Amino acid sequence: MKILINFIRNLLGYIIAIIDLATRGPKPKRTPEKQKQINNELKHLSLYQFFACPFCIKTRRAMHKLNLPIEKRSASEGSPHRAALLAGGGQIKVPCLRIEQEGKVEWLYESSEIIRYLKTHFA
Ligand SMILES: N[C@@H](CCC(=O)N[C@@H](CS)C(=O)NCC(=O)O)C(=O)O
């Protein structure tokens, strides 16, 4: 029964992820200089995620709407990033934004918090 529920949940997740990719629309444009500056700032960020997780899809969609090409790291079983998420953040829960600033690392959980952070810093 649990296997069936997981299967249906994953299937729905993949369908939502594909609908998201198909309906995103164009990214907002910036001047090349401004985009270069933002891309440099984004080097300090990475998003730990699952492809088919609805909360990750919501976060990736917000990143697209803000035109923020943040590095994405899969936290799926078997991925080397999974252990880093657990060791650094303290739990396997996605999405999680890793923020590295002045030698310090912060792990920000909760899709709404991550989107709020991105809007505050980059909108
Ligand atoms: N309230 C959280 C929910 C996040 C959540 O439940 N993520 C699930 C995946 S959809 C998760 O990481 N579960 C742990 C696991 O699958 O190991 C958010 O908005 O980010």
Image: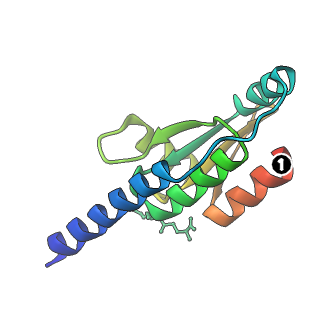
Q: Which quadrant of the view contains residue 13?
A: bottom left
| Residue at numbered disc 1 | 123
Relative to 78, does residue 86 appear above or below in the rendering? below
Give the secondary structure at mark 1.
Answer: loop
Q: Residue at x 22, y 75 (%)?
A: 5
Q: Residue at x 43, y 57 (%)?
A: 19
Left or right for 70, reference 55: right
Q: Amino acid at mark 1?
A: Ala
Left or right for 27, reference 57: right
Relative to 112, does residue 59 appear above or below in the rendering? above
Residue at the bottom extreme of this rendering: 1
Q: Which quadrant of the view contains residue 64?
A: top right
- Percent x, y of residue 28: 74, 41
Left or right for 59, reference 74: right
- Asked whether the viewer can see residue 107, the reply is no
Q: Quadrant of the N terminus?
A: bottom left
- Percent x, y of residue 50: 42, 51
In this view, the residue in front, 24 or 99, is 24
- Percent x, y of residue 32: 81, 21
Scheme of colours in the image: rainbow
- Percent x, y of residue 83: 42, 43
Q: Residue at x 16, y 72 (%)?
A: 4
Q: Residues within 10 Å of mark 1 (few under 14, many from 20)?
A: few
